[in-house]
Image: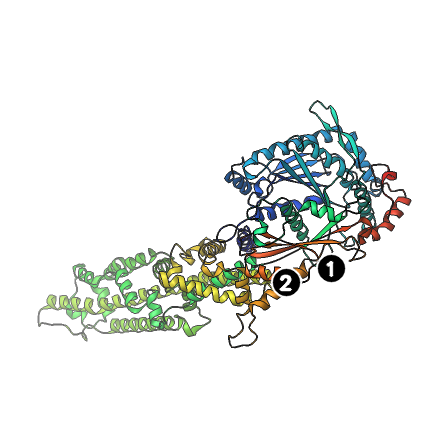
Amino acid sequence: MMTQTKVERFATEYARDEDRLTGRDDNQSSIHYPTVFLFIGDKAGDAIEPMIQISDRKWDNSAGVMYVHIASRGLGVEVSGGEDSAARSAASARHGAEPGGRVARLVLPLGGSGDNDSRRTIRRDVHRKFYAEEGGLLELNRILRKVSSDIAEYGRLYASFDRIHLAVITRADDPLTVLVPEITLLAEAIFQQSFKSVQTDLYALISEREQAESFGYASSAGVAFLRELDYMQSPDYSFSAPLHVTEDRIAIEVTHPASPLFDLVYVLTDKNERGMSSFDEEDNYEIICHMNLLKNRKRIDSAGAHGMDSYNNTSLRNNLMTESGRIGFVSAGFSKVKRPNHSIALAVLYHFYRELTERMKGGPERTAAEKLAWFGLNTEAIEAQVDQTVPAAERLGDMNGLMTHGISFSQLKRMTLREAEEALFGSGCTAFFRENYERAAESAIRQLPDDELHDAVRQRLAAQTDTCFYHVYAWTNEAEEAGSVWPLLHGRIREAARALEAARAELEQKYSETVEAQSFQRLPLMDKHNVRSFIRAFFDTVYFQKLEVLRLETELRLYRKYEAELERLHAICKQYVQQLESLERTLREAALASIRRADDYIGQNIMEYYERVTADVMRDIESKRGPGAFGEERYMGSVTCLLEQGIEALAARLCEVCRDHMLTAAPFRQTFEEELLRRANVTIDYSNQEVLSRDELFKKLYRTLEENAGIHIRLLDYTHKHRYEEKYFFGDATSEFMRYALNEEETSRIYKLGCVHEKRSSGVEKLNMMGGFRVEDLMYYRNGKMYYESYVQNGYRFHGIDPGLLPPIR
């Protein structure tokens, strides 16, 4: 599980860094004026972390963006930097800002019990408690003033401090939406003390998917907020309340003169115009970030330089305004086509690993005898070890100095050799041989390390690049005798056992022979000479044979010892191989799962294409650094040593080498169009007429962008009379695909078309905006009215203000 997490983190970090648009030919956009995202309600908090990640990827000066979350659960105030605060603090420091928290959270003491009785009046009660609980309002003042002060620390990140952009984000059915006017106007009042103007927009997020247990109440609460929003956006909307509180609890009126509360109101639901909810919820957060970039982009290259209209907020508002002065709401759709970097990283990691393991399994062909010699178990090596273990035969000469019992040759000559040894020496010879040979050999064997063979193999593996534990596993695999050393080793063990048995029989046969039958010099009447002559012959035959038996016993013991060690070594290597096979499955499954999550068209042929690319890059590295390059320390080093540390160590090193040496190679620096075109044709023979042309690719990409950028709202009538549209591309305006797309849009468009020029090769994004609709045009409002009216008739109170002030239910 840890390995899978590590691999996913590797791919996520690679994709994130690629999406940052930094380095190579890419660059990031920057926002011009300071920006604060104000999240109101418990449910709105889900958007904070995704939006931080999006802005960090897209905006060069994202470290200066502040996030404020006003919630209602529990008590207390928290100021934090989010999950990646350390990284963002470092980014802040790089831009000259002091490290600090960018996410400020305030939990107001407003929560109810959540039971049915509490739900009947929760929105109204929240509104009343907000004014009754002085502590909560004082903390709200403090936290907003702190945010305003903190923005000054990021001065170098912004081109101007004349204006601040305030983006209010909330979920329509959250009870805290009843406080949207109070919180928004207080924030504006505090920010106006530091900035010349505050531009405020509202992003209302709506869930249209029916909730099985609370769809009636949720719809009623959402409709209640939309009615209030309709009121807030009316030309004659005014507001005044003692919201500005000093440290001495002196309240000051905050006043809003007759005018719409928000510059623009964006309504984003989880269904598009066609009623489909197949897009990711994070697309709404992408829309919010891209809308803020449109409104507040630092001009690097003028759009006019590329013949494109730029965004004009005043023009958009004017086109959304009716004769009565009401400003229509806005919605949007977002889509992108880009390199599927997450999937690519995992595919390359998998194929890199596969190529490595194939190299590890390769190497020169060896005979069984050569394999056994590699382990140091060839006949010569074993004989040499026997020589080191068993003392040399020269020491047998010392036996001539043993004391003998007084016995004549005439008495000896009819005895067997065993009887003669007993008569001459008693147990002296046996004791001498046991002490000087048998025990010495036993001691030498005992002193051999239990893992002698394992240690020797580790040293050989470290010193040789053409052999690894894969070979050791195969050579010691009894289940697959075809390539293993076992048949030959077992044959030699059997030979040694037979030789020992024969030597023992020969020794026993020799002992049973008579003295008289032996061949040695005899002299008449020279009794003592004949005894000494026999003794020398006895030692030269019997004890040399005993020494041969001991050598054969020692050889067999060594073979048995190394046989057991080979079995243990095989178990270790088998575990390594199983770990590698498991890692291969993990990498493959991760890659395929990521590809499945990618768009079918954008994610096609990833495994096939990057199998070739990875192999080419590895061959290129080896051509420059030699065939064993990946065994060098600068690359993988010893895979065996990594496995000894655990499979996580190997996975970490794989990710590191893949990131530093594979994904930085030339084939990964293509534009997304080039990469996709090559990948689309990778499985097609060049003579095949079905090869995808560049124009056909562009046509598919263009269609994909437009189809996936459906507006995130369902209206009763698509073609309502106030409908107004604008569409914007985000990408390199000079690229071939962008020129194609812009040309396609020019042919028959009835909407404003713009392009945010970002010199980058990683992809293209499209934001479709549609505005001019009103509350009553929303299907969500139409469907929720009956619930709202029924709940009101049944005693539910949804509003903090007098419902009579609100516009009629349309």
Asked whether residue 564 is in view, the answer is no
The Cα atoms of the two marked residues, 2 and 1, are separated by 26 Å
Above or below, comparing residue 575 to residue 46 in the picture: below
Which residue matches tag 2?
A: 744
Front position in the image: 492 or 324:
324
On the image, the x and y values in percent for residue 362 come to 41, 68
N-term-proximal mark, 2 vs 1: 1
Q: Secondary structure beneath disc 1? A: loop
On the image, the x and y values in percent for residue 518 come to 18, 74
| Left or right: 491 as drawn, with respect to 325 | left
Point 27% across, 71% down: residue:
507
Q: Which quarter of the image is occupied by the N terminus?
A: bottom right
Dividing the picture into quadrants, the one containing residue 768 is bottom right
- Specify few, some or many for label 2: CA neighbours under 10 Å numbering under 14, 14-19, or 20 or more: few
- Specify few, some or many for label 1: CA neighbours under 10 Å numbering under 14, 14-19, or 20 or more: few
Q: Amino acid at mark 1?
A: Met
Front position in the image: 802 or 254:
254
Which residue matches tag 1?
A: 276
| Left or right: 678 as drawn, with respect to 137 | left
Point 17% across, 65% down: residue:
407
On the image, the x and y values in percent for residue 354 come to 48, 64
